[in-house]
Amino acid sequence: MAGERAGIDVGTVRYVAGLCRLELTGDEEELFAAQLSDILNYIDKLNELDTSEVEPLAQAIEIPNVFRDDAPRGSLEVSEALANAPEKTGGFYKVPAVLEG
Amino acid sequence: MPVEDYDIVIGLESHARLLTETKMFCGCLTRFGAEPNSQTCPVCIGMPGVLPVTNRKAVMLGLRAALAFRCEIPARMRFDRKNYYYPDIPKNYQVSQNYSPVGAGGFVEIEADGVRKRIGLDNIHLEEDAGRLMHPEGSGADYSTVDLNRAGTPLLEIVTRPDMSSLTEVEAYMETLRRTLEALEISDCRMEEGSLRFEASISLKPLGSTTLGKRVEIKNLNSTRAVLNCLEYEIRRQAAALDAGEPLTQETRLYNETTGRSERMRSKEEAHDYRYFPEPDLGPIVVLDEWLDRIRSEMPELPNLRKWRFQEAYSLPAYDAGVLTQKRSIADYFEETIAAAEAMGAEAADLAKQVSNWLMGPILREVNERRVDIAGLNIPPAHLAELVGLIQKGTISKNIAQDLVPIMIETGDPPETIASRRGMIQISDAYAVEKLVSDVLEAHGKQVAEYKDGKKAVLGFLMGQVMRQAKGKANPQVVREILTRTLQS
Amino acid sequence: MAEEVASATAVEIARMVAGGSISAREVALTFLDRIEKVNSSTNAFLHVNQDWSLSCADLIDQKIARGENPGPLAGVPIAIKDALCIEGAPTTCGSRILEDYRPPYTATVVRRVLEAGAVPIGKTNMDEFAMGSSNESSGFRKCFNPWDLSRAPGGSSGGSAVAVAAGMAPVALGSDTGGSIRQPAAFCGVTGMKPTWGRVSRYGLGAFASSLDQVGPLSRTVEDSALLLSVIAGHDERDSTSLPDPVDDYRSALGSIKGLRVGVPAEYFGEGLDGEVAAAVRAAIATLEEMGASLVEVSLPHLPYAVAAYCIVSMAESSSNLARYDGVHYGARKGGTRGIDELYAGTRAQLLGREVKRRIMLGTFVLSSGYYDAYYLKGLKARRLIRRDFEEAFEKVDVIAGPTTPTAAFRIGEKINDPLAMYLSDIFTISAPLAGIPAISVPCGFTSERLPVGFQIMGRLLDEKTVLSAAAAFQGATDFHEAACPL
Ligand SMILES: [Mg+2]
Ligand SMILES: [Zn+2]
């Protein structure tokens, strides 16, 4: 299993970069393909562990049933909300045209 | 092949906005129509360092839906992050439920063309809504705008199995879903405000064929009308393609309400890779039995089940039962009226139908005209029961009863009190009517003679005279009876 | 007086200010002056706003003049990691993508220290989004170790550690995800503590990896860390993962360690541990024994898997946490205007640094279709095994002691092009956040090149008290924490 997982090629790097919206240069693609392969190779050492009977641990301490009441708590003024927006227009955030849903 | 020669397989995903005052994970209001970006805070803008805190009511509404639809409820659930980039989801992930939805399985029971059918559910889950992305009308603007007021609003997504095979079923499903969510006060389902939105998936295969057709998903369906129009278009489009031997592809299409057509958005190969994983900023929800017990005890009967019970228990026509169970408050009102009438000793076999007629007619007309809920109409069920009883006993005529309704609303008084105070009670008392009749006969000797000569038509004239003497308040049936008897004696 | 203040602890400063022997303004001026002198050679601070600091100090002085209680941190200057939000103040998380960002709200921990009378003295340098172990990944400028300016101060809370080590602030706030408080504390010869996960609110801390991140104190003495922790710990209704348990007065709880059972894990003294570091740490453990503690050998067999599990968990979470930095709702925008995807990709490509990109890429990969079980779930399962090691060890011992880092501060440039080597330098600090347990690093000696060595003490979940007691006792018996850096 380790064998087939080790290694990440430039195609995979491109696919992943697309998923996380990173524009990479050709050099970066090569670099990341090599570095990510190294790291994944190292990570594959986890395959030495038999975890078939082990429950995943997502949080060190789980606090169940933390809720808030359905009660309003002040919102920001429109001007405060948009104060950090790189581009805005008439009370809206402005982005390049997005035409499909 | 004609369309009838294909098996149609349809599934629906519905997003219903939950009836909460505030958002899923922050205290911003969820009111529709507010000034753009006026109902946002660092949390729902997804600013650095913010953390979510779950709205208890939203979770309880999700559990209510899960119980109502007979879903399996997990003992423990989490929220998961669904990762994708879009300018209307400021964190570029949506907090949703993937691995442990609030409800798994279950069904929505519908009635289409008089046949009851269970539409299976895959799951129902809680999630936060996206904001609104808009493209300025006309002008050919090269930008879009984002309003985050809706971002973070609690949603319930209800995903069916591909169990629907006709547009009639789809329509019945959407209607049942809407009625149920409304009756259970899970969502207001205001489609014009986007409170209930749909996505459909549809495939066609030759009748009886066991190979599945290519599944096409359609997004952007903002009304039941749009769903039906779009599916109708899609059925024709796919049937035509299959007829022509053109291969269909598994793809996502976007419905264009203006053209009435669906347009290709992306193929399966370009499908999203959402990278779901458990939301690490929130702990688990351990579903407590006491929550479920309480929700169950507060849960009203589902509208469809109630409709079918009304048909059986009260021998009501399907139409009446449907109208009466449209809203929980109306159905409750109906049953309370029947109970009150029975408590007053009503025995008529058609009592339920009579109450139904009054309710569907004058009462609902007033409700609609006055734009109030039936509970706000100022006619408690006991008063309507009394009204129906008075008619049955002949104390008042139907016409008088009609006149009484607005007065009952104005004053809030019971009908008998109003009728007697205003002298609207019918004279049914035989002695009083006999007195009136003998007075009239005495004054109209000529007509009495004509009657006795066989000119029976004169009876109508004499009836009219008695009624005039009674100022319209005599019970016409009693008058006719006594008049005939006296004339013949 | 000014000179006395410059070397005073937070406890002493608060006492002096509250007692009226010096004003908060004078204290602030002393430290602002020191920042003026040495910040340019260390780059510990990214933002200093003298006017704001002084106006905060004046508020404390006015409180005292009115006879009000100025709080337990009266007039204590505090350096704040730039990952913590302060309303209206720059908060960059060390990234150029947030260069001009001004949050509209203040982090809970910052609010708490201000309410306790502390005076914010500046915001400290860090690895971009806390991703790094050397501060070389700061989006703005490298930060230098005051013991040897050619060496890394450690990271990611490097600026906070340097600020304390070089006398620019008596105490600082940092955040620790895989060692980001303890490792720079060790490299810079100061005390730094990562509390139990959930003990301190994360609300307002720019997230790296949610299930590991924890805010904590840096200071010269354990007593100061105890004081600061008492102020910042406690439940916060804005953080669903913050623990409801009552908070101890950690300072007054510092006590004797007679009978304390100290676990010494063999795995912490294996291959890769620098000889001089090993010697200093062994001597530190011997000191605890001399003071009445008993040493017990324990085993943490899954230590070799900690870095791998950490990479998966932290990078997966961070790939999602950092998705919001896209140039749409706040922060800088760069690159394409031809379409939204081009805008995202261009902005992120130009304004995020290489280490951040690398981790986002890896995190995205381990969550992507087909790899979730093989990597992400596997990582969470390994995490469970690592946690189990600690649970078993803590049945036999009260604390576990060992080195904070395998080596003393490495040279700038030494590891920056070898990410795996960089990650492996956190091998000893990474387990505590995976298990959620509290851990502290205190100075325990020097290498022959006079670089500080850190001694790490870890404890049971929510047992900060015992960890702090052990560390305080060690400091009571040693003077490594009093050594002044040459700067
Ligand atoms: Mg959804
Ligand atoms: Zn909000």
Image (spheres, coloured by chain):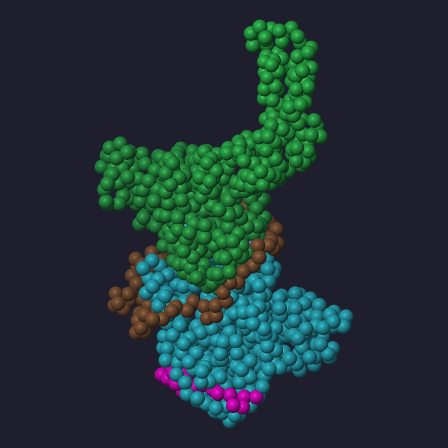
Tell which of C3 and B114 is nearer to you.
B114
Q: Which chain is brown?
A: A
Rendered shade, chain C:
cyan
Residue C247: image location, x then y, percent? 59, 74
Q: Residue at x 44, y 62 (%)?
A: B76
Residue at 58% over, 44% down: B34
Q: In which quadrant of the rendered view does residue C246 lie?
A: bottom right
Let me know if residue B71 appears in the view. Answer: yes
* Quadrant in the picture for the C terminus of chain B: top right
Residue lying at the far front of the rendered structure:
B489
- The colour with which the image depicts chain B is green
Determine whether B190 is above or below A5 in the image. Answer: above
Residue B369 coordinates in the image, percent (x, y): 59, 32
Q: Which residues are magenta?
A: C256-276
Camera-nearest residue between C14 and C112: C112
Q: Position of residue A35 (x, y in %)?
A: 34, 67
- The answer to whether B101 is drawn above or below residue C65 in the figure is above
Q: For the view shown, which residue lies furthest in the bottom direction?
A: C290
